[in-house]
């Protein structure tokens, strides 16, 4: 189930993106949590084509909780939404939930995914066991925004 944190900023392609990339997103959420603690999976979508997503059309990153406000700064979201997200970052269950932002250009949606059919640790196991099927950049989920630069962990 999806609970939007950024009410009113949504469009239908984000749901399709999340559905089509769910295992990769869950993998990124769990890998990020294990290496950096609580945080949010951030996806930058270069081309929002709901069918036939390719690996060149998006970038998946993990943003540690402390870096989330800075990451969201360019989108000028209301302070109330930032506060809701920061509260969610402190209370979500990394073993069962995923906090995710999906952005394209200046459009962004932030969701709290709960009651998942496949939990993040299982997504991680499945992706690791079937790595070649996912065509992931090995460093893509280990990138984070620190000081405005992408830094490999």
Image (cartoon, grey):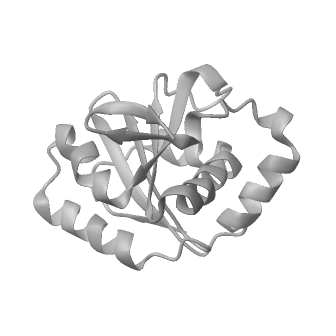
In the rendered view, does 92 fall on the left or right side of 35?
A: left
Residue at x 18% of width, y 43% of height? 73
In the rendered view, does 71 fall on the left or right side of 26?
A: left
x%, y% of residue 43? Answer: 47, 40
Q: Quadrant of residue 34?
A: bottom right
Residue at x 20% of width, y 67% of height? 83
x%, y% of residue 71? Answer: 28, 44
Frontmost residue, 13 versus 116? 116
In the rendered view, does 139 fall on the left or right side of 131?
A: left
x%, y% of residue 109? Answer: 36, 48
Residue at x 75% of width, y 29% of height? 135
Q: Quadrant of residue 124?
A: bottom right
Frontmost residue, 49 versus 34? 34
| Farthest-out residue, front | 153
Frontmost residue, 42 versus 110? 42
Say if 136 sits above or below 116 in the image.
above
Residue at x 55% of width, y 42% of height? 142
Say if 62 sits above or below 87 in the image.
above
């Amino acid at each position: 189930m999806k609970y939007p944190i950024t009410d009113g900023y949504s469009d239908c392609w984000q749901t399709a993106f999340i559905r089509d990339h769910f295992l990769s997103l869950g993998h990124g959420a769990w890998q990020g949590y294990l290496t950096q603690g609580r945080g949010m999976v951030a996806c930058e979508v270069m081309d929002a084509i709901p069918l036939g997503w390719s690996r060149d059309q998006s970038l998946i990153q993990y943003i540690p909780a402390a870096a989330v406000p800075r990451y969201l700064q360019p989108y000028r979201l209301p302070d109330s939404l930032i506060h809701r997200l920061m509260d969610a970052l402190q209370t979500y269950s990394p073993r069962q939930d995923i906090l995710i932002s999906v952005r394209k250009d200046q459009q962004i949606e932030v969701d709290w995914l709960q009651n998942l059919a496949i939990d993040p640790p299982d997504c991680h196991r499945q992706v690791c066991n079937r790595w070649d099927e996912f065509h992931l950049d090995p460093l893509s989920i280990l990138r984070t925004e620190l000081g405005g630069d992408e830094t490999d962990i």
